[in-house]
Amino acid sequence: MAIIGNVVKRSLAGAVLGLALASSGPTDALADDAHPFAQYVGFWQGSGRAESVRGEQQAMSCSATCEEAEGGKALSQSIQCSGARFRFQIENYIVDKGGEVVGNWREQTQQAIGSVTGHIQGTQFTGQISAPLFSASVWMKADARSQALRILPKGVDVAKVEIVMKRQ
C-alpha cells in the first residue's frame, strides 16, 4: 500500500501520537475542570484503520498507556499501533492551560518530533499536530470505558486515521 513511505510513515505516526487517546460516551459531565485528562488515564487496547487519499484502507491494532502529570493538568501518553505493513510508537506530553492545550510528541521509530496545540472541553480535545513536513487536524474523546481518536492529515498520502480503544 502506498501510504507507508517515509514521510507518510512519519506523518501517520506523528498524527496518531499527538493524540492517540480518546473516545465517545455520555460522560463529559464527569470531567473535572482541575483534572481535564482524568478520563484518559489508564491502559487501553483497541483497533483502528488508516485510509489513503486513494481510498485504500489498512487495519491496525493499538494500545496506549496514559498517565496524569502536574496535578492532573498534564497527560503523558505512550501509544503503539501496528498494521500489516507498518508500526509506530509515539510518546506524547500535553498540558491544559485553562482549556488551551499545548504539548509535544515524538515518534520513536522514525525519530519524528513536533508540537500539539488545541482546546479541551469536558473530555473532548480538538486540535492540530505540526511538524516540519506534516500537519493534521485531531479530535479525541474519552470516557470511563473507551477513547476514540480521529486524525485528518494534510499534504500526505494518508487521508484519515481512526482509532477506538477500550479500557483494560
Image (spheres, rainbow, N blue to C red):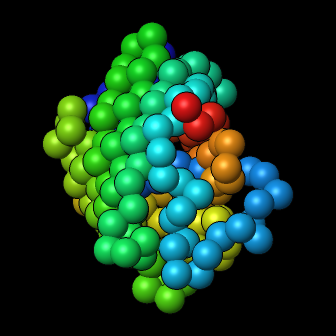
The single residue placed furthest to the left in the displayed view is: 111
Q: Which of 127 and 144 is in front in this view?
A: 144
Whether residue 165 is visible to the viewer of this picture, yes or no, is: no
The single residue placed furthest to the bottom in the displayed view is: 98
Say which quarter of the image contains residue 88: top left
Say which quarter of the image contains residue 71: bottom left
Q: Which of 139 and 34 is in front in this view?
A: 34
Q: Whole-percent x and y of residue 111?
A: 17, 42
Q: Whole-percent x and y of residue 147?
A: 62, 46
* Quadrant containing the C terminus in the rendered view: top right
Q: Which of 161 and 143 is in front in this view?
A: 143
Q: In this view, does 86 lie to the left or right of 99?
A: left
Q: Whole-percent x and y of residue 6?
A: 27, 32
Q: Nearer the viewer, residue 116 or 44?
A: 44
Q: Residue at x 32, y 74 (%)?
A: 70
Q: Residue at x 59, y 81 (%)?
A: 33
Position of residue 17 relative to residue 117, above or below, is above
Position of residue 128 relative to residue 62, above or below, is below
Position of residue 57 relative to residue 29, above or below, is above
Q: Whole-percent x and y of residue 135?
A: 42, 58
The single residue placed furthest to the top in the displayed view is: 84
Q: Residue at x 58, y 28 (%)?
A: 46
Position of residue 94 relative to residue 146, above or below, is below
Q: Count how many numbered circles sit on residues in the image.
A: 0
Q: Is residue 10 left or right of residue 41?
A: left
